[in-house]
Amino acid sequence: MRCKTLTAAAVVMLMMTAGCSTLERVVYRPDINQGNYLVANDVAKIHNGMTQQQVAYTLGTPMMRDPFGSNVWYYVFRQEPGHENVKQQTLTLTFDSNGILTNIDNKPNLTASNN
C-alpha cells in the first residue's frame, strides 16, 4: 500500500512540475540563424553610387527582392539564440532604374558592438 502511495505522489509531482518554466531552461534549445549574416565591415563598404553587381559582390545575393521589380533588395538576418529573445537585422537597399544604389536603410544600425 505504501508503494502505491509513493508512486501516486511521484506521478502527481511529475505532472505538476512538467509545465514549470524553471525546467524550460534545462532543456537544450539550439540557436537558429536564418538569412544573410552581415558584419559591420561589409556594410561599411556599401555606399550610394554602387551598381547592383558591386553590391552583390560585396554582400552576396539578397534574401529577397522587390516582388514588383528589382529596384529594392532586402538583406535579412534573424537570430534566435536558445532561450533568449529573437534578434533581427534588416538592410534595405534601393536602386534607381539604371541599377545604381540610391538609398541604404539599416535597421537596427549594424555597428561593431552588435557583432
Image (tube, helix red, strand yellow):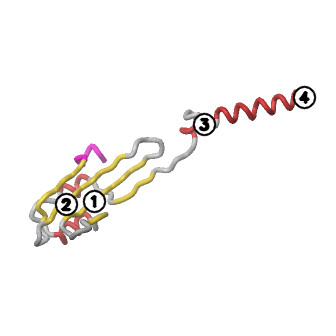
Q: Residues within 10 Å of mark 2 (few under 14, many from 20)?
A: many
State yes or no: discs 3 and 4 in contact (Cβ < 8 Å).
no
Residue 75: mark: 1
**What amino acid is labelled 3 in the image?**
Gly
**What amino acid is labelled 2 in the image?**
Leu
Residue receiving disc 3: 19
Residue 110: mark: none
Q: Is residue 93 magenta?
A: no
* Element carrying mark 3: loop
Residue receiving disc 4: 1
Task: Tell me where the magenta segment starts and ends, as one range.
Answer: 108-115
Q: Quadrant of residue 26?
A: top right
User: From the viewer's perspective, is residue 23 above or below residue 103?
Assistant: above
Whole-Å distance between the Cαs marked 1 and 4? 65 Å
Whole-Å distance between the Cαs marked 4 and 2? 73 Å
Residue receiving disc 2: 93
User: From the viewer's perspective, is residue 101 above or below residue 113?
Assistant: below
Q: Position of residue 98 (x, y in %)?
A: 10, 72
Dominant secondary structure of the residues highlighted in magenta in the image: loop
Whole-Å distance between the Cαs marked 3 and 4? 29 Å
Q: Is residue 18 left or right of residue 96?
A: right
**What amino acid is labelled 1 in the image?**
Tyr
State yes or no: discs 2 and 1 in contact (Cβ < 8 Å).
yes
* Element carrying mark 1: strand
Q: Position of residue 29 (x, y in %)?
A: 52, 47
